[in-house]
Amino acid sequence: MKRRWLFALGAAAGVGAVSAAVARKRRDAARLAERGRKLAEASAERGKNIVILGAGFGGFNTASALVAALPPESGWKVTLVDRHNYHLFTPLLYHAATGLVEPSHILFPVRTLAHAPHFQFREADIRSIDLKERQVHLDNGPLSYDILVLALGSVTNFFGKEAELENVLTLKTTGDAVAIRNRIIDAFEDAESAADPMERRRCLTFVVVGGGATGVELVGAIRGLTRDTMGRQYPSIDPAEVRLLLLEAMPQILAGVDPEFGQTALERLRQAGVEVRLGSAVERVDADGVLTSDGDVIPSRTVIWTAGVKPAPVVERLDVPKIRGGRITVDPFLGVPGFRGVYALGDVAASIDPKTGKPLPTSAAVAVQQAKALAEILVARLEDQDPLPFRYIHRGELVSLGRHEAVADVMGVRLTGFPAWLMWRGFYLSQLFGFKNQLGVALDWTFAYMYQRDTVRMDLPTEPSHQRPLAEPAAGS
Ligand SMILES: Cc1cc2nc3c(=O)[nH]c(=O)nc-3n(C[C@H](O)[C@H](O)[C@H](O)COP(=O)(O)OP(=O)(O)OC[C@H]3O[C@@H](n4cnc5c(N)ncnc54)[C@H](O)[C@@H]3O)c2cc1C
C-alpha cells in the first residue's frame, strides 16, 4: 500500500515537472517571438548582418548566444568566419600532443549552429578589415557588416627572435600537437639506435620554454609520456635517461597568479624530476640545442616554445587604439572606442579589470565570459535598452602537472595531488563542446590510464588550411 502511494506521488511529481518544463519552453518561445517582432520594428531595414571573426572561445560562444537570443524574425543575421570549420578546445591540446587524447576529440564542428536560419558560416582566411568601408576582405571575397565582433585570438610570440629560434616547435593548433608527438617518438627511435652516448642524451632531452600555464602543463604531460608509456615501449632506454627541462626567464613560474600557488607548482614539478630553471632566458636554438642567457648550452633535439602570445596578425595591422603588446583597447561594453558597432573580445582585446586597473589575462575563461556578456550587450542595444557592462568573475586556478598531480585554487579552496587532478579532469571534461567529444575524451583518458597512451606516429598533413590555393574559376564561367 505504502509503495503504491510512493509510486503515485513520484508519478505526479514527474508529470508536474514535465508540464512545468513545457510551460516554461512555451513562455520562452513566446518571449523570443515578441522580441523578434520588436527588433524587426526597431531595425527598419531587414537583413542586417552581425559578422563575428574567429570561431574560438570568444567568437563561437558569442555566435551561439546570439543565435539563441535573436529570433530569425528579427531580420538580423549572424555570420561567423574562420579559416577552420571547427572550434578547437585548446586546454586539451597538450593531451593530444602526448597521446592522451585523439586530436579529433577536441575539435567541434561550428556548422552545428547552421540549423538556425539566421546563422551563416564562411570558411575563409581573413586577409584585412576596412573599418571605414565596414567591410572584411576574405580570401574568397568581401563581406559587409553592420556590427563587427573581432575574436581572432593570438599567435605565438617569439619576441622578434624568429631568426635565432631554428626548428622550435609551438603548441597552438592540432597540427602543432601532432608535430610534437611525432618529434618525441622520433627522438626515442633515434636514441635507441644512436651509437654515440652524447647523441643518445641529446635525443632524450626535452626542453619546454616558458613557465606559463601552457608550458607547465605541457612539461608535466611530456613527463608522463616519456617516463611511463615510452619507458615500457623502449625497454633498452632507462626512464632515468630522459631529461626534462622547463626554462623560464622570470624569477617564478605561473606569473600573474598568487605566488604561493606558483611556488607549490614549482616544488611539485621539481619533485617529479623536472629541471625548472628560473631567470633563464633563451638566446638561441639551433640543431645542437639551446643556448641560454647564462651561457649554458643544453643539447636537445626537441625544444617547444610556449613563452608568449600576441594578437593575430590581422589585428596587428588594424589601426585602432591598443595597449602595449598590441591588444585592442575596449570600453566596459567591449566596444572599440571611436568605431561604432565594432567590438573585440578574447585574446585580441584588453578588458581592464576594475579591481586591479590592469588588463585581464588572455584565457579561455575570460573569452567565454566576455562572449556571454557581449551577446547580452548587443541584444540590449538592438532593443534600445541600456546594457550592463562586462564584469569578469574570477573563479580560480587549475593547473595539471601530470599523472595524479595538479594544483587547484577554486573559490579559496586549495587542493594538490590526486583530488586536484580529478577536479582538473572533471572540470575540463564538463567544458568540452558536444557529448560525442566528451565521451571520446573520457574513453581516451580511461584507456590511457588503464593501458597505455597512443604512441602511433601520425603522418598527417599539418599545413594550415589557409595555405590552400584559391579556387580556380570553373571552366566556361
Ligand atoms: C595549448 C594551450 C592551452 C591552453 N589552456 C588554457 C586553459 O587551460 N585555460 C584557459 O582559460 N585558457 C587556456 N588557453 C588560452 C586560450 O586558448 C585562449 O585564451 C582562448 O582560446 C582565447 O579565445 P579567443 O576566442 O580569443 O581565440 P581563439 O580561441 O584562439 O580563436 C581564434 C580563432 O580565430 C581564427 N583565426 C585567426 N586568424 C584568422 C584569420 N586570419 N582568418 C580566419 N580565421 C582566423 C582561428 O582559426 C581561431 O579559430 C590555452 C591556450 C593554448 C595554446
Image (tube, rainbow, N blue to C red):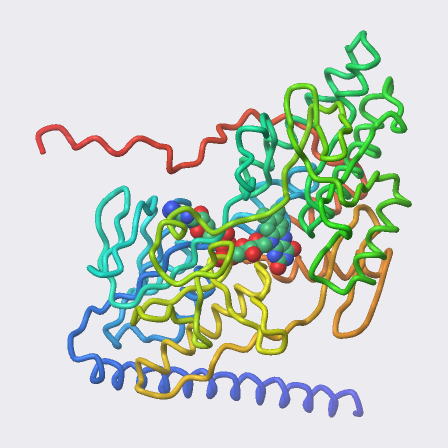
Q: Can residue 436 be seen?
A: no
Task: Tell whether 115 sits left or right of 373.
Answer: left
Toward which corner of the image does residue 338 lie, by quadrant?
Answer: bottom left
Between residues 23 and 302, which one lies in front from this camera angle? 302
The reply to whether residue 244 is visible in this rendering is yes
* Image x and y of residue 127, in percent: 31, 45
Image position of 7 with respect to 113: above or below: below
Query: Which residue is rendered at x = 29% and y = 68% of the image?
Result: 147
Q: Is residue 67 left or right of residue 405?
A: left
Give residue 391's position: percent from left, percent from top: 55, 78
Identify the residue shown where x is 84% and y is 64%.
415
| Left/right of residue 81 with respect to residue 38 in the rendered view | right
Judge whether 191 appears above or below 223 on screen: above
- Residue nearest the viewer, comparing 378 with 212: 212
Q: Determine the residue located farthest toward the left in the rendered image.
A: 476
Quarter of the image holding residue 194? top right
Task: Give me the residue at 22% from left, 84% from top.
Answer: 42
Percent across and percent down for residue 244 are 80, 34
**Residue projecting furthest to the front:** 294
- In the foreground, 286 or 422: 286
Residue visible at 30% across and 49% down in the picture: 128
Q: Quadrant of the C terminus?
A: top left
* Image spot of residue 359 (x, y percent): 56, 66
Count of numbered tags: 0
Residue 107 position (above or below residue 99):
below
* Near-viewer residue (109 or 253): 253
Q: Quadrant of the N terminus?
A: bottom right
